Structure formats: C-alpha cells, structure tokens
Image (cartoon, helix red, strand yellow):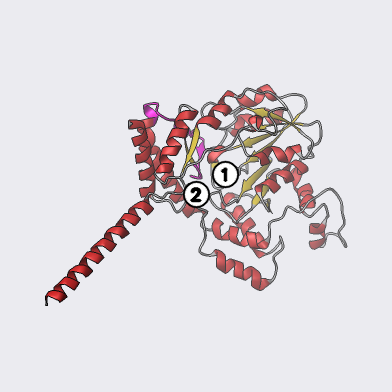
Amino acid sequence: MNELIYKTQIRLECFTFTAKVSNHLEMQSAHNIPFHRAYQSTRAANYLNEVLKLNNSASDGDFHQKCKGWFKQNQQISNVFLCGSCTDALEFSGLLAGLKSGDEIILPSYTFASTANAFLLRGCTIRFADTSSLRPNVELEQILPHVTAQTKAIVLIHYAGIAIDMDPILAFANAHNILVIEDAAQCIGARYKDKFLGSIAPLGCLSFHPSKIIHCGEGGALLVNQASYLNQAELIFEKGTNRKAFQHHETSFYEWQTIGSSYGMSEFQAAVLFSQLEELPMVINHQMQLWNLYQQNLNELHVKGMLRLPNVPDYAHINGSEFYIVLNNESQRSQLQQMLASQNIQTTTHYRALHRSSFYKNKLNQNLINTDSFESCLLRLPLHFYLTESDVLIVCDRIDQFFKK
C-alpha cells in the first residue's frame, strides 16, 4: 500500500513538473514575436493543383483573368499587367514612358533601390528629393526645388501605405507636361480619398513580395491608368510583338514591332495571388485592428515626446501594412531595438537612404535632412496577419518599460 502511495506521489510530482515546464515554455514562446510572417491562403494549394491539371503555366491563363477581374470588380481598375515582381513593373513603366538618356527623374531617396534602378537602366539622371518632416513621403514642396527643363517624370512612394497628397502634384505635373508614376509597392487596398493607390497617376506599380500584406512568392503589377499608354503597354508586355492583336484575330500573323521584354507573372504566381486577393479584406481588417491597437497604446509616449507615431492625414486611408515609430535619435533607437531583441521581439529599421548608399554617395553631395532623420530614427514594429492583440500589447508594454528606466 505504501509503495502504491509512493508511486502515485512520484507520478503526480512528475506531472506537476511537466506542466510547469510546459507553461514556462509557453510563456517563453508567447514572447517570441517575429517582425513578419508571410500570409498564406488556405485556397492556394487547390488553385495550384488546378493549374497543374490544366497544364497551362504561362502568363495568360485562367487565374490571370481572375486576378484582373478582381481588380476591375473591386477597385475599378481595368488595365492591369501582372508582372514577375514590382521591380519588373517599375522597369516596364520606364520603358513604356519612353524615358531615355538625358531625361531627369525626381524620386525620394528614402526608398528601395529598385525604384531608382528602373530609371537608371533607361539612362536617366536621378534627382533625389527629401521627404516631408511629418512622414517618410515626398510632397510637392520637396519636389519643386528639383524641377528643371529636363524633368520628365516624378516617381512617388506612398510609404507604409500612407497616401501622398496627390492632387497638387498631379496638377503641377500636368501643367508642366511631367509624367507621374506611383510606386505603390506597399499599398494594395490603401486609398487616397476615394481612389486606390496605384490607380491615380497615369502609371502605378504594386508589389506582391512576401514582405507585403499579401503576396504570391514574388510578384507585382503595372496599372496603366491613362488610355494613351495602353496599346504600347500591350506590345511591350508581349516581348515587343503584336501577339495580342493576333490572338484577337486582328491580324493574320504577329511580329516584332518595338522593344519589349518578358515581364509576365506565371500562372502559378497568379493562382496564389488570386487566393490572397479573395481574402484581402479580411487581412486588412485584422492588421488595421492591430495597427490601431499600437496607436492607442503608444499614444501617451507620443504625447510626452518620447517617440513619434505615424502621421496619417485625413485624405489617407491606410491598409495596416506597416507600423513604425520614430525615436529622438539613432542611439535611442539602437538601445530600444537591442532591449526588444533581448525580449525575443524582432524589430527592424528600414531603408538606407539612396543618396548615402555606397553606390551613389560619390555621384552627388546632397543634404536631405528629413530623409537622414528617418533613416537614423525610424523603427518598424512587428505587424502581420498571424500577430495577435496579446503580442501587440506585449510589444507596447516593453516599449513603455524602456522609457520608464
């Protein structure tokens, strides 16, 4: 009998110990908060199987048409060219615009290298504009000092899905015969007033990279919003041939007619993209809840001047793609980032400003005060579909503790 009691006690103690270890690991796991985790649709596997069954993986299959139909139905965008990446879309836009050596392009320094590469490949001269002091966006005020008689295009970045004030820029550009191109890489579902970003300027580019709110592995799109570019866009997209006219029985053969390239997204990519486009409203809704939770819980620190929160103007309707804070100096940002890392919370800075990059800093000497400040002080916090409200509250609590020390 005593032996039975002893064995029972041992088993209970082992169970209690195991439970404690399990709870401890769960607590540790709860504090393991990754910066990003790419969204996955439950429908993607079925759609990929459909592509395999149909044995049509080129860039003009059923899922391409479904994606285009989605844009037309949900965003009133009719002319969508699905590309292998947003980099492809940007390069496509430069070729379509007929940009060439001697042309000057104004774009922000606070952006990814692809934005500049697309136009350097055309032989253009880059003029870097500073951002606004309020947010990492270029506005008309920052563009005007760089306009010359050689200015042929202005490329705009809606940072973190926060819209630039488009109306005054478009009015100025139209008056001076300057093309505006939207690099709306982070912006699917975000709007300027009642218009979706990427659909406002004559040409717009979207990204479906895994780092974005929805993705298809690698992917992008060129939105052609001005009818005068459409015929040329179709030729370029078909490698410089009139293949589309041939498919529509408008000619008896097709041939090489202009410089083009192979920018098209594969049907496999389109299948994954369509599975995520269908679920975009749900993804945005969830990420906006988390975005607002960050904003609410960090607002006291913002009011006290400990940090700055994203400044979103009334005309901008964001998609919750990113949440960032701006610290008062680079040292403070580094200390906070290190402290959060010690708590298993992953954060990240963002762009190395292009005008200060090893590739470009010797080509011209520019002093872009606001850009330099965002590069040194901006810190991006975890935000993705698989993040929970509890995760956000933990991050906010740790940031609050940092400033109380």
Q: CA distance from mark 2 to mark 1?
A: 14 Å
Which residue lies at the image location 68% right of the left edge and 48% below the top edge?
222
Q: Position of residue 357 (x, y in %)?
A: 65, 33
Q: Earlier along the polypeptide chain: callout 2 or callout 1?
A: 2
Q: Magenta residues?
A: 302-322
Q: Secondary structure at mark 2?
A: loop
Q: Secondary structure at mark 1?
A: loop
Q: Residues within 10 Å of mark 1 (few under 14, many from 20)?
A: many
Q: Amino acid at mark 2?
A: His
Q: Left of 238 or right of it: where is 195?
A: left
Q: Position of residue 110 (x, y in %)?
A: 60, 33
Pointer 2 residue: 36
Magenta stretch, main secondary structure class: loop
User: Closer to the camera, 235 or 334?
Assistant: 334
Q: Amino acid at mark 1?
A: Gln
Q: Position of residue 346 (x, y in %)?
A: 46, 45
Total residue callouts: 2
Residue 201 visible somewhere in the drawing? no
